[in-house]
Image: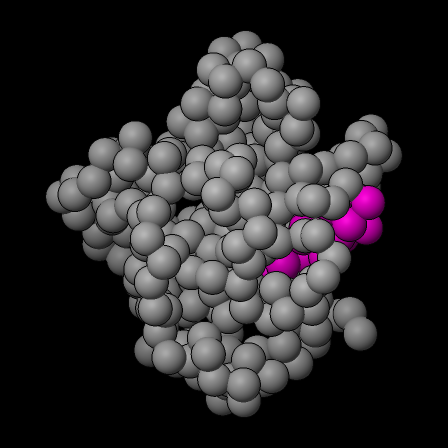
């Protein structure tokens, strides 16, 4: 029985993926969310174990990782799904509990930190998998203005955070080569019928089932067990924005990430 942690499991793709995996009857689900009431509803439907944490706080992310590591002796799959989208009418620039631009904090720094904190457990559980839920919406970070303090839009912030996550995926895959831990990123589907898509004001394009299937393929399909360091759009491997492959861009992103997370 595989132990699978899904972040952002109280709604949208995270909840649908948890319900899909629960129906298989062969997984132990660890469900993360910010809203305890909604998370409890998902736990009732799936039999999963719940963990609440606010990803706008790096301290909360560290606490979540410590709770999981203390209560479980293995972790077979980490699905970094939690995130913040953008709004139809836009929003003013927001910051996290640590003073970072909010979408950079929640969509990028939080999953990077959570993964880093859980790597010892994932390594001990190998073969294991990390699945980063990214987006086809991608834009490079401006290293002269990484916190997007000039010309802010929530769309730009979202796209920057998602390209950063893809670039980090490629670096982490190289770091973990030969360890038995794979790491891939996926744009599950386009504008699924979720609350996040609704807030964006965009018309629904793909079904939630399409997004679930694309994510599930990287979670437990035997055919993807040894695939690592790839970016997928739906169930097909695709090419991300060019900066994700640029060694200099990735080096500068790594330096920025270590600085913002205050890690060596």
- Magenta span main SS: helix
70 with respect to 92 (left or right): right
Q: Residue furthest top?
A: 44
Identify the residue shown where x is 34% and y is 47%.
235
**What's the colour scheme?**
one colour
Q: Which residues are magenta?
A: 107-124
Question: From what the image shows, is residue 143 above or below residue 24?
Answer: below
Q: Is residue 112 magenta?
A: yes
Q: Is residue 154 left or right of residue 175?
A: left
Q: Nearer the viewer, residue 154 or 15?
A: 15
Query: In the rendering, at what x and y percent does residue 96 appear?
Result: 57, 57
Residue 10 place in picture, x, y as percent? 49, 28
In the picture, the quarter occupied by the N terminus is top right
- Is residue 62 visible in this depiction of the protein? no
* Relative image position of residue 72 (x, y in whole percent): 80, 30
User: Relative to residue 237, is residue 97 drawn left or right?
Assistant: right
């Amino acid at each position: 029985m595989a132990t699978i942690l899904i972040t952002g499991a109280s709604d949208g793709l995270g909840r649908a993926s948890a319900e899909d995996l629960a129906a298989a009857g062969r997984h132990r689900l660890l469900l993360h969310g910010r809203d305890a009431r909604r998370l409890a509803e998902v736990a009732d439907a799936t039999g999963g174990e719940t963990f609440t944490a606010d990803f706008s706080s790096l301290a909360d992310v560290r606490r979540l990782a410590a709770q999981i590591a203390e209560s479980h002796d293995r972790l077979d799959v980490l699905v970094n799904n939690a995130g913040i989208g953008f709004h139809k009418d836009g929003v003013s620039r927001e910051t996290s509990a640590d003073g970072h631009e909010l979408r950079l904090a929640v969509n990028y720094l939080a999953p990077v930190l959570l993964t880093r904190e859980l790597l010892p457990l994932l390594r001990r559980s190998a073969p294991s998998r990390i699945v980063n839920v990214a987006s086809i919406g991608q834009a490079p970070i401006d290293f002269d203005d990484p916190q997007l303090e000039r010309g802010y839009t929530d769309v730009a912030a979202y796209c920057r955070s998602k390209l950063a996550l893809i670039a980090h995926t490629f670096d982490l895959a190289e770091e973990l080569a030969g360890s038995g831990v794979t790491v891939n990123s996926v744009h599950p589907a386009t504008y699924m019928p979720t609350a996040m898509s609704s807030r964006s004001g965009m018309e629904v394009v793909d079904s939630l089932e399409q997004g679930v299937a694309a994510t599930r393929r990287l979670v437990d399909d035997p055919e993807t067990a040894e695939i690592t360091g790839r970016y997928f759009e739906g169930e097909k491997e695709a090419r991300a924005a060019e900066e994700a492959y640029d060694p200099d861009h990735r080096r500068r992103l790594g330096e920025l990430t270590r600085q913002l997370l205050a890690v060596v």
